[in-house]
Amino acid sequence: MPEAAAGPALAGATLTAAQLAGLAAAARQDAPPLALLRAADAVGHEAMGHRLCTAMRFDAAAATVRRLHSSAPDAYPVGGTKPKRDTDWARHVLQERRTFVGEGEAAIRRHFADHALILGLGLRSVVNVPVVLRGACLGTLNFLWAEDAVRPGQVALAELLGLIVVPDWAAASMG
C-alpha cells in the first residue's frame, strides 16, 4: 500500500516502525501483568498526545467498571470503581461494544458522573474503546485530550490499541 494512502486515514496519529516493533515484542514476551496495556499507553501518548489513559474491567453482573490502569493515579487510582447501569454510554460501549467519542465540555458533562474531575484536569475530549474477546466486552481502554475535538486518526489508533491489549484482560480474568 502506498504511504500516501495511509496518511489521511491516520492523520494526527501515526506509529513508527519502532513503536510497532515494540508493541509486537511486548505481545510476544512473558511479561509482567498489564505490560501490553502500559506499552499501548506509552506508544499512544507518543503518537496521539493523549493526556490521560485509563483502562477499566467490566463486571456485567454488577454493572460496574474497575480501573486496571491509570496514567494519572493521583486523580484516577487503580482499583477505583464506577457504576455503569442503565446509561446511554454503557449501552453504547459495554453492551453494543461500540467506540464512544465525546467531544467538548457538554459531552463530558452529559456522559460522565465524574465530569467535574475530568474537566478540572483540563480534559475536553475522550475516546472509550470497548475491549472485546469472543463477542464479550471485558472492559474499556480510554484516552482523553485537552482539545475539544478528536481527529479520525486518534480514533483509529485508539481502536487498534484496544485490540492489542486484549490479552491483558484475558490474562486478568484467568488470574
Image: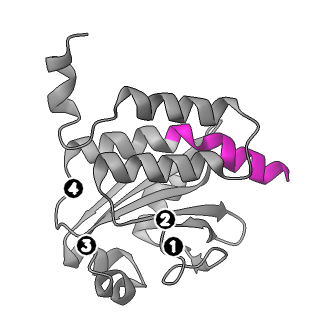
- The amino acid marked with disc number 2 is Ala
Q: Nearer the viewer, mark 2 or mark 4?
A: 4
Residue linked to disc 2:
90
Residue linked to disc 4:
150
Q: Nearer the viewer, mark 2 or mark 1?
A: 2
Tell whether 33 sits left or right of 1. right
Disc 3/disc 2 C-alpha distance (Å): 14 Å
* Residue 156 lies in the magenta stretch: no
Disc 2/disc 4 C-alpha distance (Å): 20 Å
Disc 4/disc 3 C-alpha distance (Å): 12 Å
Image height of 81 relative to 7, above or below: below
Residue linked to disc 1:
86
Residue linked to disc 3:
107
Q: Are marks 2 and 1 in contact (CB under 8 Å)?
A: yes
Q: Tell me which numbered mark, 3 or 2, is placed earlier along the sequence.
A: 2
Q: Are marks 2 and 4 in contact (CB under 8 Å)?
A: no
Q: Tell me which numbered mark, 3 or 1, is placed earlier along the sequence.
A: 1
Seen at 36% across and 74% down, the residue is 111
At label 4, counting other C-alpha atoms closer than 10 Å, the crowd grade (few under 14, some 14-19, many 20 or more) is many
Q: Nearer the viewer, mark 3 or mark 2?
A: 3
Specify the farthest residue to the top: 1
